[in-house]
Amino acid sequence: MKPRTGHAVYLTLALAVMTLPLLFKGHGTSPLEIPAVAFVRSRSDDRPVSIMITGVPEKSGVYRVARGSTCQSVINMALPNSSVNYLPPATVGRILCDGDVVIVRNKNRATSDVSLGKLAVSQLMLMRIPLDPNRMDIKDWELLPGIGPELARRIVCDRQDNGDFSSFEALERVPGIGPKTLMSLKEFF
């Protein structure tokens, strides 16, 4: 399948524009102004996960936290002097993964509601966070170079008919995806 050059240029330009706030976030601040949430080390696995926190004044942004960090632990770091008014029971002990978004809605200075979301595939690509082929829809697949609407539809239909892909390489079971296409997509997974 021939890549759409105009689409790739547009995507690259859009991703570059979205990167600017991330590049300049925190520049010019003293070390005392850097939030405590910024980085937490894990003894068993030093590779952190990338998450986003929204709704916390002066602390919203993208952070790398220890693999195995729970939603509750991140909330405790981001909102040390606030009580969480509502946190869905399934969310409390949930271990955060790459691309998770902790969404805080402040009720007042003392209480907040918290929910979890997921970064858009375009944001994951921008931040070079590996994509999960089992969580992508047709529009997400179309963002990748060389994947048009028809191939994107085939990928999603194959997953619905045959179950999740056991690995990135399992995408080869989809008609229209061969070794060459896999090689061109590997950097995103």
Image: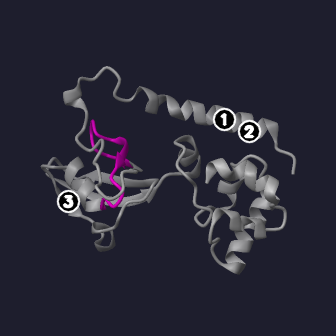
For label 3, the crowd category at 10 Å Cα-Cα, with few meaning under 14, some 14 to 19 and many 20 or more, is some
Q: Residue at x 30, y 69 (%)?
A: 88
Query: Which amino acid, by three-letter code, is at mark 2?
Result: Ala
Residue 129 image offset from top left, x and y in percent? 52, 49
Instruction: Answer whether residue 131 is magenta in the image.
Output: no
Determine the image quadrant of residue 170: bottom right
Query: Which amino acid, by three-letter code, is at mark 3?
Result: Val
Q: Is residue 150 above or below residue 1?
A: below
For label 1, the crowd category at 10 Å Cα-Cα, with few meaning under 14, some 14 to 19 and many 20 or more, is few
Q: What residue would you read off at disc 1?
A: 12
Q: What residue would you read off at disc 2?
A: 8
Range of the magenta residues? 52-70
Q: Along the line of sight, which residue is nearer the eye, 116 or 184?
A: 184
Q: Along the line of sight, which residue is nearer the eye, 57 or 30?
A: 30
Q: Residue at x 32, y 59 (%)?
A: 44
Residue 77 image offset from top left, x and y in percent? 21, 50
Residue 186 image offset from top left, x and y in percent? 67, 52
Label 1: element kind? helix
User: Which mark, residue 84?
Assistant: 3
Query: Which amino acid, by three-letter code, is at mark 1?
Result: Thr
Which residue sits furthest front? 44
Q: How many marks?
A: 3
Question: Which badge, 2 or 3, is on the more N-terminal residue?
Answer: 2
Mark pair 3, 1: CA separation:
39 Å
Mark pair 2, 3: CA separation:
42 Å
Label 2: element kind? helix
Would you say the residues marked 2 and 1 are in contact, meaning their CB atoms lie under 8 Å apart? yes
Mark pair 2, 1: CA separation:
6 Å
Between label 2 and label 3, give the one nearer the viewer.
2
Query: Is 125 on the left or on the right of 146, as rendered?
Result: left
